[in-house]
Image: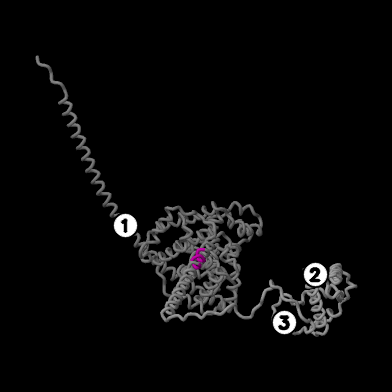
């Protein structure tokens, strides 16, 4: 038995060697094999121990006494490179097929395949059973089931989109309101605002001005600020009359967005400069910058005279932080046209010059020492205050402070800017007076002054509510025009120059007359509203007097009743005392 097993093993090895020799011949004759594999070094140049061990094993088996041939098999020695190639190139793991060894006719009879070697079959494992045909009813049920599943998937997808949209809205709202609030609202004040906002038909109801002043002074809740601004704008419309010339063309916002503007380049440049550190506007061409671009583009198309001016982006940005894009555009129109802020953005900038003169006059009248100090160093208000008016303090001051300024502007109008500027300069007067040159003074006002603390911000806001400078502003404006005319008359000019100046002055005066007419109409409307308020107050006063008289009569009647009760009590007490006294003893 042992001899037979050795014989089978030797036959197997001989067949393998013959297979490799035939494969080697095939490789040398094949053109597809690289040349470097055909001319490898002989095995004695690469004397490896593995191949010598294999040689000794074959010789031992060949000289075994049980060998049938008794003759040792001579094998060709291979280099180690050839061994690696043969191990890789020999198809040991390929599937057996009739054409597997057709290219190797010299192999002879190969050893039988191992029973453990996997069998590759081209056909299937067994006969495929025929599918049972479905009835029309079953097919209909399957279709109905598939349609219902598809409808359910579509509904779920829509709900997911709604949830995603709501999450995005909440995230944007959090990003928008990411600023430190000044004068935080108490719950009682928030309740007052919520009651006013939830009043049915509030756009047609005039609320008490003192109540609104008190509510704004006590604070505006940040999450309701946009709605409160719209409410204050509605109240402003109810109390003022606006001439038809002052109102812009009624063009839908979406229609304006479809048009092209010549100010596109200037708007795109200023997008990155508007609140660059705020998370809602910091992303380049993100949601915040795109919405801001749409608002500024639409306004430049609506107001052809102003178009776009630096500073408008900050005002639109503040509005956009507290409301939607279209609502912010409406509020921008309200500020520019109804409140008259667009005058300071006109190309001639005459109104801005008048505002600078008015601010200088306020400093002269209220803070003379500060005015003299600034004049000594030749520092005019245009060096530091022009951005305050053009951006409403939004370009330099914290957002919480700017939001409070906007609260007061929606309530009182554009004169709030003068009040805030005067309060800021007056409260920091001792620090400004310490600086003794132009650079340090301007640097303090432009860079250090805006970084005031929360306490100083609240103090400034409270001072603004207590100030009333409307009469002074009107007087200073008239004074500016008178001085301008005097300078024109006194200057030694030629006739042509004088004519040109007179024409320019005439055109500017016409514009100013139109502005004054508009202001007069607004003032008349305000007077009418105040007269109506006075009438209401007089009526309520008469009612209160009548109620007071009735209460006094009731009080006197009650006092008489008390006196009568006291008298009766005294009589009762005397009667009881008389009854309780013991009778005198008989004689």
Lower sequence index among marks 2 and 1: 2
Q: Is residue 532 above or below residue 265?
A: above
Q: Quadrant of the N terminus?
A: bottom right
- Tag 1 residue: 538
Q: Which mark is residue 3?
A: 2
Tell us which disc is closer to us: 3 or 1: 3
Q: Secondary structure at mark 2?
A: helix
Tell us which disc is closer to us: 2 or 1: 2
Q: Position of residue 178 (x, y in %)?
A: 54, 60
Q: Tell me the residue at 26%/52% (across/down).
A: 546
Q: Is residue 165 magenta?
A: yes
Q: Position of residue 531 (x, y in %)?
A: 35, 62
Q: Secondary structure at mark 1?
A: helix
Number of numbered markers: 3
Viewer-nearest residue: 424 or 200: 200
Q: Position of residue 19 (x, y in %)?
A: 79, 79
- What is the crowding at mark 3: few (fewer than 14 residues within 10 Å), some, or many (at least 20)? few
- Tag 3 residue: 100
């Amino acid at each position: 038995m042992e001899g037979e097993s050795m014989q089978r093993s030797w036959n197997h090895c001989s067949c393998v060697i013959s297979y490799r020799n035939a494969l080697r011949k095939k490789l040398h004759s094949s053109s597809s094999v690289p040349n470097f594999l055909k001319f490898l070094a002989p095995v004695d140049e690469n004397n490896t121990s593995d191949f010598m061990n294999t040689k000794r094993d074959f010789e031992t088996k060949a000289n075994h006494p049980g060998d049938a041939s008794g003759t040792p098999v001579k094998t060709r020695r291979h280099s180690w490179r050839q061994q690696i190639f043969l191990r890789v190139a020999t198809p040991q793991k390929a599937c057996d097929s009739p054409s597997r060894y057709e290219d190797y006719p010299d192999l002879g009879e190969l050893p039988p395949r191992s029973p453990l070697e996997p069998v590759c079959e081209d056909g299937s494992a067994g006969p495929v059973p025929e599918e049972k045909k479905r009835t029309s009813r079953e097919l209909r049920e399957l279709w109905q089931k598939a349609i219902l599943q598809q409808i359910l998937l579509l509904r779920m997808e829509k709900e997911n989109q709604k949830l995603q949209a709501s999450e995005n809205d909440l995230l944007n709202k959090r990003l928008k309101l990411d600023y430190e609030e000044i004068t935080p609202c108490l719950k009682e004040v928030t309740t007052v605002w919520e009651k006013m906002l939830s009043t049915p038909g509030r756009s047609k109801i005039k609320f008490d001005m003192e109540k609104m002043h008190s509510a704004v002074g006590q604070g505006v809740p940040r999450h309701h600020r946009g709605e409160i601004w719209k409410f204050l704008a509605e109240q402003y419309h109810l109390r003022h009359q606006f001439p038809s010339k002052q109102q812009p063309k009624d063009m839908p916002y979406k229609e304006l967005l479809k048009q092209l503007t010549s100010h596109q380049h200037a708007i795109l440049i200023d997008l990155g400069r508007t609140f660059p550190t705020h998370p809602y506007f910091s992303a380049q061409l993100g949601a915040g910058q795109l919405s801001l671009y749409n608002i500024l583009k639409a306004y430049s198309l609506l107001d052809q005279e102003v178009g776009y001016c630096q500073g408008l982006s900050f005002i639109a940005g503040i509005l956009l932080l507290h409301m939607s894009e279209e609502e912010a555009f409406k509020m921008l129109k309200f500020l520019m046209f109804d409140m008259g802020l667009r005058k300071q953005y006109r190309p001639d900038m005459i109104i801005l010059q008048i505002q600078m003169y008015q601010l200088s006059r306020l400093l002269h009248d209220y803070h003379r020492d500060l005015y003299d100090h600034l004049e000594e160093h030749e520092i005019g208000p245009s060096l530091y205050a022009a951005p305050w008016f053009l951006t409403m303090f939004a370009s330099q001051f914290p957002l919480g402070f700017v939001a409070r300024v906007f609260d007061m502007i929606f309530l009182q109008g554009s004169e709030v800017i003068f009040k805030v500027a005067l309060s800021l300069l007056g409260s920091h007067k001792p620090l400004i007076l310490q600086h003794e040159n132009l650079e340090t003074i301007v640097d303090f006002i432009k860079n250090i002054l805006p970084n005031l603390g929360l306490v100083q911000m609240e103090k400034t806001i409270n001072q603004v509510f207590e100030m009333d400078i409307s009469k002074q502003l009107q007087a200073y404006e008239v004074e500016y025009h008178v001085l301008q005319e005097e300078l024109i008359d006194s200057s030694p000019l030629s006739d042509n120059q004088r004519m040109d100046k007179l024409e320019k002055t005439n055109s500017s005066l016409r514009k100013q007359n139109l502005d004054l007419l508009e202001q007069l109409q607004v003032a008349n409307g305000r007077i009418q509203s105040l007269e109506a308020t006075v009438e209401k107050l007089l009526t309520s006063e008469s009612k209160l007097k009548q109620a007071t008289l009735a209460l006094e009569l009731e009080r006197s009647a009650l006092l008489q009743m008390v006196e009568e009760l006291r008298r009766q009590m005294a009589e009762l007490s005397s009667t009881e005392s008389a009854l309780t006294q013991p009778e005198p003893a008989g004689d």
